[in-house]
Amino acid sequence: MSLPRFATRAGGAAGSGPALHVVTFGCQMNKYDSLLVEGRFVARGWRLVEAMDEADLILFNTCSVREHAEERVYSWLGELRRAKRARPDLVLGVMGCLAQRAEEEVFARAAHVDIVCGTRQFQNLPDLVEELVARRADPRSGQAAAHRLLATDPSPRVTVDRSREVYTGGPAGYLAVMRGCDLSCTFCIVPAVRGRVVSRPLPEIVAEARWMVEGGARAITLLGQTVNSYGADLLAPPSGTPRGPGRRGRPDLADVIRALQGIDGLARIRLVTLHPAYVTASLAQALAECDKAERFLPLPAQSGSDAVLRGMKRGYTSDLYRRRVDLLRAAVPDLELSSDWIVGFPGETEEDFAASEALLAEIGFAQGFVFKYDPRPGTPAAGRADDVPAAVKKERHARLLAAAERAALLRMESWIGRTVTVLVEGGAGRRKGLLRGAGMHGLPVAFPGEESLGGATVRVRVGEASPYGLAGTRV
Ligand code: F3S
């Protein structure tokens, strides 16, 4: 079926395909999924445009992790109401986690949206858009409701084959090795919107990594909602083996790291995000052996209080968290760590909060991200009284954030005077003449240099530190 042109607009050169603009919210997995979607449309003859008003199709790839993330999407959609009135042919789509969670509710709050497409359906978007356009062209389907499509069946498996696309991810690209989460943290919407763990076969991951490196990637971030649970679904455990982390006889993330270590031209392997319960000796060993694996891991603790961790159903105690850090640091002594923290979880007392402060100070995190608890509809914790007053949440948030910044500054300052090998990833935002990259320890480094250095590795002597990164000069 050939795609109709919806409209002719500035930038839409004659003979070129219809135009797509994707707006991405949320985590790195969403950024990756947006690339997959763009690739599918480009393969059908579409072109990508930077300006929304040049687009025939605008897609919002959304996040549902906090209410604020959802409200930002609705506010963007509200902004587009007038554009949609002026250009009824414009197709507006909402995909990602909000789409999966809210389904019909998106149409109820934004009646001008045409397509709502969930986290396991987004690869069908080109077909859905074609179907929508065909329905609109059919005089028998006069009802406005017939001009809307909802695709949120969570059962299909997401398949990825980018081999016929051109890699556009730059020196540092993303590669999802698994999707979904088998855990049931009581505050988290992710299992509800992303489903159970589905791991990709190792040969498929290696093929995509090679394709990325041939296209210019020097660093690859291996993505998964709990990336170190990779493989949990790939091989049925022997009967009698308890479910959960640590099952034997199945491929794991260590196998993926070792396989990528062998790819010529690849300089760095990054991991996002780990769950403490799935940290194993096998993973620690692979990190120790593979010099392409960055010496940096995001390992969210969420809280230092065992009572709160139990309420969150995180599957570990603060002591087990410490032991997992010890295991990793025994294998990789110079490892840097980051953590997410939640303050104001239901029932959190001042004593519980003090336990978070203590764990944060003790571990010595190079990065800390602190969030106020925000009940998400559909999560088990949303059924509990949100009993920590807003003012207390605010005050604990400020205190823990200050503590996280102090801890990060200590780690960053320990790098002053040292020379690090930086993989250059691009310009440092609006500051002209400044480049940004990361050392083997994953910490951001800024230094003066020419943009032509993108993708190169350079030696930088660290002269300054802030809680957010390092700055220096080339040596
Ligand atoms: Fe948000 Fe979904 Fe990622 S809820 S954080 S976009 S997995």
Image (cartoon, rainbow, N blue to C red):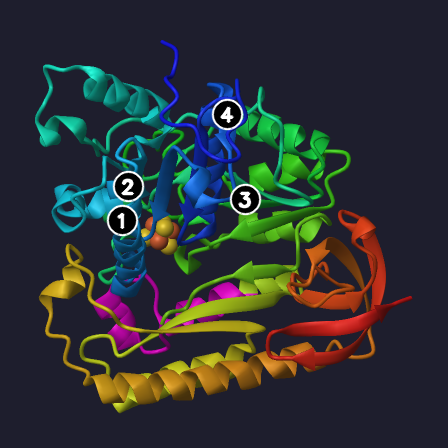
Lower position in the chain sequence, tag 3 or tag 2:
2
Q: Which mark, residue 82?
A: 1
Q: Which residue is mark 3?
A: 222
Q: Nearer the viewer, mark 2 or mark 4?
A: 2
Left or right of 102, for residue 231? right
Type of the residue with mark 4: Val
Q: Nearer the viewer, mark 3 or mark 4?
A: 4
The stretch of residues the image draws in magenta is 303-326
Q: Quadrant of the C terminus?
A: bottom right
Q: Is residue 239 above or below residue 104?
A: above
Would you say residue 334 is visible in this rendering?
no
SS at mark 2 in the image: helix
Q: Which mark, residue 86?
A: 2
Lower position in the chain sequence, tag 2 or tag 4:
4
Name which residue lies at 52% across and 67% down.
Answer: 338
Type of the residue with mark 2: Ala
